[in-house]
Image (cartoon, grey):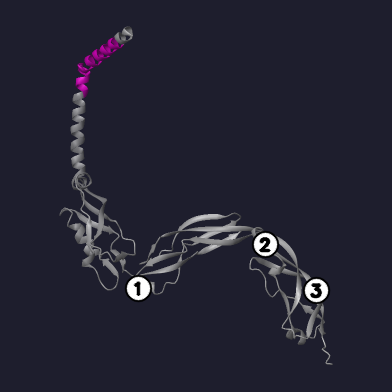
């Protein structure tokens, strides 16, 4: 261990002597003198260059103050404005390195009005920005060139949320349900805007060839002067696969007199339909009615009945009957008086 420490110390001393001897050489002194004059030349070049005119951009913060508690700002307000200026390079360098701009404050009380809208013109903004610039600095442009916002004074409405856009399933699939959470939102807006709103719509959604359940998060459709609480909603799109099923359903007479009875041949027909796999086992023959109206038969001159499904479960589609026509007979019962 001692031998190792001694070697390290010797190496350090030897390296130190080499560096010291190099720094005392004539070549190193010449290098220092050369570097000094290069630095001076660079400084003079920089001063000469910065004395010319340049253009640059700065950002100035924007603040809204003195907003009453019952006021809701319902539009997006810029938090800064972009300023493009022109001046000598030395002045612009001072802006960049040593000077920070004070925020432009907008006092709500100075602009409160009955129209629920506030607009600061370009001239007013230019005056406020120019007050923070050197007299020699030329203000070229502002972005945005005007500042405005919309507010509501405690006026709101609770509206249902509706999904906007186009959602299409893949072949042999269908959209079984679309769930939105939350299903309603609080909407703040000036009364003249709020009066014409009945539904809060989501941003447009375009989904194609869905074959599995899909969940997504989206904003509500932006309207100038309108603020939603909350501003986002979750959408669950439930997708199911079609299957085909057949059940046997009896034919029944509707609105027949008490002494008359409908007989059909056959008395039952097969009903074939499409249904989602999740509802397949729940759908039975009792979910369908094939009814024949008495008046329709009396007014018909045909020998067969054209069958239709008069009621069915909303979960089924593409209903087909086999057979679609049947022969029929109306039986009349006679009561004998003794």
Residue at x-position 70% and y-position 70%: 288
Callout 1 secondary element: helix
| Sequence order check, earlier mark of 1 and 2 | 1
Q: Position of residue 21 (x, y in %)?
A: 22, 14
Q: Quadrant of the C terminus?
A: bottom right
Q: Is residue 5 visible?
A: yes
* Badge nearest the viewer, 1 or 2: 2
Q: Which secondary structure dominates the residues rendered in magenta?
A: helix
Q: Is residue 170 visible?
A: no
Is residue 244 positioned above or below 254 on the image?
above
User: How far apart are labels 2 and 3 at the CA level?
Assistant: 24 Å
User: In the rendered structure, are the residues bearing label 1 and label 2 in contact, judged by CB atoms less than 8 Å apart?
Assistant: no
| Sequence order check, earlier mark of 1 and 3 | 1
Residue 152 in the figure: left or right of residue 212: left
* Badge nearest the viewer, 1 or 3: 3
Q: Position of residue 146 (x, y in %)?
A: 28, 63
Q: Is residue 23 magenta?
A: yes
| Sequence order check, earlier mark of 2 and 3 | 3
Residue furthest out toward the top? 3
Q: Which sits in the foreground, 99 or 221? A: 221
Q: Position of residue 184 (x, y in %)?
A: 45, 65
Q: Quadrant of the N terminus?
A: top left
The stretch of residues the image draws in magenta is 8-31
Residue furthest out toward the left? 135
Residue 169 in the figure: left or right of residue 327: left
The circle drawn on residue 282 is 2
Callout 2 secondary element: loop
> Residue under circle 1?
191
Is residue 305 positioned above or below 237 on the image?
below
Residue at x-position 73% and y-position 69%: 320
């Amino acid at each position: 261990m001692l031998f190792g420490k001694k070697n390290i110390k010797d190496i350090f001393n030897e390296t130190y002597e080499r560096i010291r001897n190099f720094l005392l050489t004539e070549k190193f002194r010449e290098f220092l003198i050369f570097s000094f004059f290069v630095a001076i030349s660079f400084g003079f070049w920089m001063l000469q260059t910065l004395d010319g005119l340049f253009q640059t951009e700065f950002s100035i913060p924007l603040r809204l103050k003195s907003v009453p508690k019952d006021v809701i700002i319902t539009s997006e307000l810029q938090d800064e404005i972009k300023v493009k200026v022109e001046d000598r390079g030395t002045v612009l360098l001072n802006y960049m390195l040593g000077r920070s701009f004070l925020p432009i404050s907008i006092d709500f009380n100075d602009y409160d009005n009955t129209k629920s809208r506030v607009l600061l013109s370009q001239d007013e903004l230019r005056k406020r920005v120019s007050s923070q610039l050197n007299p020699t600095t030329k203000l070229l442009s502002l972005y945005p060139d005007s500042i405005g916002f919309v507010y509501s004074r405690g006026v709101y409405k609770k509206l249902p949320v509706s999904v906007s856009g186009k959602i299409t399933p893949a072949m042999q699939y269908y959209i079984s349900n679309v769930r939105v959470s939350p299903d309603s939102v609080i909407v703040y807006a000036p009364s003249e805007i709020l009066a014409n709103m009945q539904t809060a719509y989501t941003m447009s959604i375009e989904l194609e060839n869905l074959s599995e359940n899909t969940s997504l998060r989206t904003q509500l459709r932006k309207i100038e002067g309108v603020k939603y609480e909350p501003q986002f909603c979750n959408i669950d799109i439930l997708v199911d696969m079609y299957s085909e099923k057949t059940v046997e359903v009896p034919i029944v007479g509707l609105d027949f007199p008490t002494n008359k009875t409908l007989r059909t041949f056959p008395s039952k027909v097969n009903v074939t339909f499409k249904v989602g796999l999740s509802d397949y086992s729940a759908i039975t023959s009792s979910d369908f009615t094939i009814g024949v109206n008495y008046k329709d038969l009396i007014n018909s001159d045909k020998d067969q009945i054209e069958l239709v499904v008069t009621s069915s479960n909303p979960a089924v589609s593409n209903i087909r009957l086999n057979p679609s026509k049947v022969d029929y007979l109306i039986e009349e019962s006679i009561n004998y008086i003794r």
